[in-house]
Amino acid sequence: MISAGSPLSAYKGVWVWIQIAQGEPYPPSLELLTVGRSVADRLKEELVALITGRGTEAHARTLAGFGCDRVVAVEHPLLESFSTDAHGKVLTDLILARKPSIVLYSASLEGRDLASVVAARTLSGLAADCTTLEVNEKGQLVQIRPDYGGKSLSAILTPKTRPQMATVRPGAYPRPAFNEARKAAIEVIIPDLRPEDIRVRPLKLEVRTTDTADVSQADILVVVGRGLRSKDNLHLAYELAEVLGGRVGATLSVVERGWLPSSFQIGQTGKIVAPRLYIALGVSGAIQHTVGMEGSKFVIAINSDPDSRIFTVADIGIVGDLFEIVPELIKRLKEYVQGKIDHEKITSLKASLPLREPS
Ligand SMILES: Cc1cc2nc3c(=O)[nH]c(=O)nc-3n(C[C@H](O)[C@H](O)[C@H](O)COP(=O)(O)OP(=O)(O)OC[C@H]3O[C@@H](n4cnc5c(N)ncnc54)[C@H](O)[C@@H]3O)c2cc1C
């Protein structure tokens, strides 16, 4: 399928596929415009936001504000809901016709699905679940992802085929700042798409979970580990998250026990998070977990084991029983929010807690 006569140098441009979810650009795909920008600048190539769906033009100006050079809005009623067949055909046709050097997708369910189909059809390379993207001295995309249970990082190159394609974990990069004054060329394309191109069509969309909160987008996270002992104790995490205006996340151990769904999992095989505040309750801090939260701006860890690894990544470590500390913390925070506690009292509260300096 790939045109045999095209040298690698014929491929130009960095494309970011912008997924639409619930009628809006999916935030993790906007994050890719940050790394897309730096890669495009390094290669001195154009950064293109490629949006596929229905009503795409309405989002084009927003995408321009996030700093791309061009928005390609692929508009068709058959692209209204995600389908691998429809979106796969549209992307494959465009890639074969326009020859971008790089195509990036968010590692969402849809992004992973789509990227693998497009890679197979265009015979191009695909590195899945990357956490860092760089450009080497040869101008190749270096696609870095954790491997061997998070104990090593692999750098993957696609030296022989184009485009170089990668799915990137949500939260790996911050969303670029929005600036209304930024301008981008806007191109609307109506693809050649027919109902018979789509072999599978969803008849009904049923949301099975009541909490669809995306931990990768949370500003404040209260993360629970096996130290919570039981699902029945989750209310402690939810109460703390509520009083702080945050969300609840989890380790793999918690998900494996069925206390929370896998969408809550943070780490190597879960989501990457970078909140302003990350509070770990009974989390040991295994490397497979911390690889997903190292970008957090401030980390507070509560753990009864003074030698727990979580303290090596914590700004404040509290050695103690979470069942004693968390209810007290919730009580004091509520008093603070209600104006019943002043700063002096907070200083004395801090002094009374067994705080441990980060090592
Ligand atoms: C290939 C692979 C991929 C993996 N991917 C992930 C991943 O994406 N995310 C992830 O999280 N893990 C992942 N893991 C698992 C990881 O190695 C750890 O097993 C897991 O993170 C441990 O979870 P935990 O901290 O909840 O449990 P534990 O390691 O059992 O830690 C529980 C902690 O709670 C503390 N504690 C107990 N009681 C109390 C109390 N009353 N008060 C305060 N503290 C208390 C203990 O001191 C302990 O430190 C992966 C493993 C492999 C092999």
Image: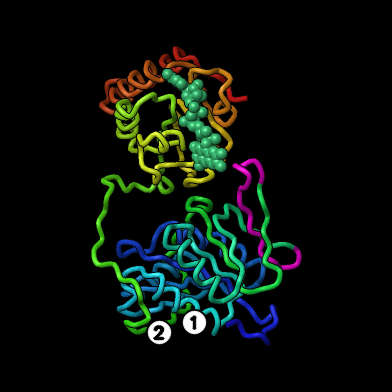
Dots 2 and 1: beta carbons under 8 Å?
Answer: yes
Residue sitting at 54 percent across and 55 percent down? Answer: 129
Q: Residue 269, percent across and down?
A: 51, 46
Label located before the other in sequence (2 or 1): 1
Q: Residue 158, percent across and down?
A: 67, 66
Q: Is residue 71 depicted above or below 150 in this figure? A: below
Q: Which mark is residue 271?
A: none
Q: Is residue 184 depicted above or below 237 in this figure? A: below
The residue carrying mark 1 is 93
Instruction: Give the amino acid type for the residue marked by disc 2 in the picture.
Output: Pro
- Number of labels in the image equals 2
Q: Residue 92, percent across and down?
A: 50, 78
Q: Secondary structure at mark 1?
A: helix
Quadrant containing the C terminus is top right
Cβ of mark 1 under 8 Å from ligand 1: the answer is no
The residue carrying mark 2 is 191
Residue sitting at 69 percent across and 78 percent down? Answer: 8
Residue furthest out toward the right: 137
Along the line of sight, the residue nearer the viewer: 330 or 148:
148
Residue 149 is inside the magenta segment:
yes
Instruction: Give the amino acid type for the residue marked by disc 1 in the picture.
Output: Asp
Magenta part of the protein: which range? 137-152
